[in-house]
């Protein structure tokens, strides 16, 4: 049966040695990375425990979730990527709060739930730059159609929770013990979709962009149904009419990824026959397409009557003071309105960059840009960057990168994220929109 029965002992020895080496490798992973967020997940792999399809841990504001008792005031619920994630890792004090946190301060919100996520800082450069996708399944299906995609990129697609996962995590929470006066939702998505889709043939990237936008409105409908059937409803309770707030969402326009420092410094070189110029052109076109379609779809979605709500989602921990008032879905003559704060984020950032450049050249334009004083020392180089030359005096080393002395002097904190000063500016502008209720409906006069 076997050509050489004597080969069996040798085969057993090699198999045994292979098993020992594998165990040693896993133990090494377990022991050498005891403290980092990434290592926690690797330790679970080494121990054979479940990792829920994700290598990196997801740090949402669980402490605040547990204390979310509702009550009078405004509650802010945040979904999205690193631009609204409030996680500050060790050594990142200069990063500052997210613009959503500054917004919370502007509108005096009384509670805040943040489900946004970011690629852990220590994962770089072991992993390529990435972030939250609108839909991991759409993203994977789109990327897999490219003849340029390498195996590693496909393997690293679903590391962070997408919009559906974040919204499901929110809906699964116990209802607050008291109904908040109002709840405003924040969505910050699209950056990493365009960043990756731009490496594909344009028709494929275009299809992925369109499908991702459709997914956003699918998830908004799910969120709206939860809002109207579980959290608020226009019903009569104890003979008194309940006035439900509008379902309001903050959605910023997408900023062109090619204008961030990391596009040139950290983006992997495109394989032939693709090129840097082609991918940059794709990113510009896809960003414009994303913003145009989003603007049109948002306007349609706001005025489109809601679809019938599914059966009410059962929460993990019932709170009868809210549930007893929500036994019936909202009457058809008292539909809770949908509305959107659609914020022009690119305008603010481009104005800051143009102001800086015009000031450097001693010029100004007809709109007045260039006549003021730039707030930043640099609008291109980030505060956190790779070491260049020997000029490292006084700089802090962080995971192999250098951190500048004055983070407030830089428009960008790192290669893909904004600095604290401009995040404060964004939060202030959106806060003014909310305070003045400058929603799409009010702009239309509805």
Image (tube, rainbow, N blue to C red):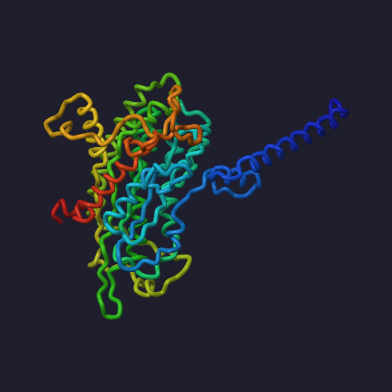
Of all residues, the one furthest to the bottom in this rendering is 239
Point out the residue furthest to the right here: 6
Q: Position of residue 306 (x, y in %)?
A: 29, 58
Furthest residue in direction front, as rendered: 394
Point out residue 29 in the picture as x, y percentages from the top left corner: 64, 40
The answer to which of 407 and 134 lies nearer the viewer is: 407
Say how many tags the image has: 0
Report which quarter residue 279 is drawn in.
top left
Does 3 sit left or right of 150 as displayed?
right
Q: Could you tell me residue 428's position as x and y percent? A: 25, 49
Look at 31% across and 59% down and name the residue there.
109
Question: Is residue 208 in view?
Answer: no
Where does the C terminus fall, quadrant-wise? bottom left
In the rendered image, the vertical position of residue 393 relative to residue 330, given as above or below? above
Q: Is residue 440 left or right of residue 210?
A: left
Q: State the residue lying farthest toward the left.
A: 366
Residue nearest the viewer, comparing 311 with 57 = 57
Residue 404 picture quarter: top left
Residue at 82 percent of width and 34 percent of height: 12
Q: Looking at the figure, which quarter contains the N terminus?
A: top right
Residue 351: x %, y % from top left: 22, 35
Residue sitting nearer the eye, 63 or 335: 63
Q: Is residue 217 above or below residue 232?
A: above
- The residue located at (34%, 71%) in the rendering is 328
Can the viewer see residue 36 in this picture? yes
């Amino acid at each position: 049966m076997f050509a050489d029965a004597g080969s069996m002992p040798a085969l057993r020895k090699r198999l045994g040695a292979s098993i020992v080496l594998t165990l040693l490798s896993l133990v090494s992973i377990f022991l050498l990375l005891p403290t980092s967020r990434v290592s926690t997940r690797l330790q679970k792999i080494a121990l054979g425990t479940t990792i829920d399809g994700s290598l990196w841990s997801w740090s949402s504001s669980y402490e605040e979730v547990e204390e979310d008792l509702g009550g009078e005031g405004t509650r802010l619920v945040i979904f999205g990527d690193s631009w609204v994630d409030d996680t500050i890792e060790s050594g990142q004090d200069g990063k500052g709060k997210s613009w959503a946190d500054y917004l919370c301060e502007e509108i005096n919100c009384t509670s805040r739930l943040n489900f946004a996520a970011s690629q852990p800082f220590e994962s770089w450069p072991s992993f390529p730059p990435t972030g939250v996708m609108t839909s991991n399944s759409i993203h994977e299906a789109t990327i897999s159609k490219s003849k340029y995609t390498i195996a590693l990129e496909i393997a690293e697609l679903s590391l962070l929770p997408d919009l559906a996962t974040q919204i499901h995590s929110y809906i699964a929470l116990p209802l607050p013990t008291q109904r908040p006066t109002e709840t405003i939702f924040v969505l910050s998505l699209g950056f990493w979709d365009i960043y990756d889709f731009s490496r594909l043939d344009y028709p494929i990237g275009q299809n992925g962009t369109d499908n991702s936008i459709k997914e956003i409105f699918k998830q908004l409908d799910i969120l709206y149904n939860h809002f109207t059937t579980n959290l608020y409803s226009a019903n009569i309770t104890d003979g008194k009419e309940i006035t439900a707030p509008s379902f309001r969402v903050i959605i910023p326009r997408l900023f062109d990824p090619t204008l961030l420092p990391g596009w040139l410094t950290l983006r992997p070189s495109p394989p032939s026959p693709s090129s840097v110029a082609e991918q940059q052109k794709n990113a510009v076109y896809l960003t414009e397409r994303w913003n145009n379609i989003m603007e049109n779809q948002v306007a349609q979605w706001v005025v489109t009557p809601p679809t019938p709500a599914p059966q009410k989602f059962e929460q993990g921990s019932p709170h009868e003071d809210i549930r007893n008032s929500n036994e019936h879905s909202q009457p058809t003559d008292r539909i809770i309105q949908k509305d959107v704060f659609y914020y022009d984020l690119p305008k603010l950032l481009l104005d800051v960059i143009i102001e800086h450049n015009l000031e450097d050249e001693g010029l100004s334009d007809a709109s007045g840009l260039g006549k003021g004083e730039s707030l930043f020392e640099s609008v291109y180089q980030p505060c956190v960057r790779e070491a260049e030359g020997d000029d490292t005096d006084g700089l802090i080393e962080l995971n192999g990168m250098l951190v500048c002395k004055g983070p407030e002097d830089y428009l960008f904190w790192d290669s893909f994220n904004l600095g604290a000063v401009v995040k404060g500016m964004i939060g202030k502008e959106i806060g003014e929109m909310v305070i003045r209720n400058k929603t799409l409906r009010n702009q239309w006069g509805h």
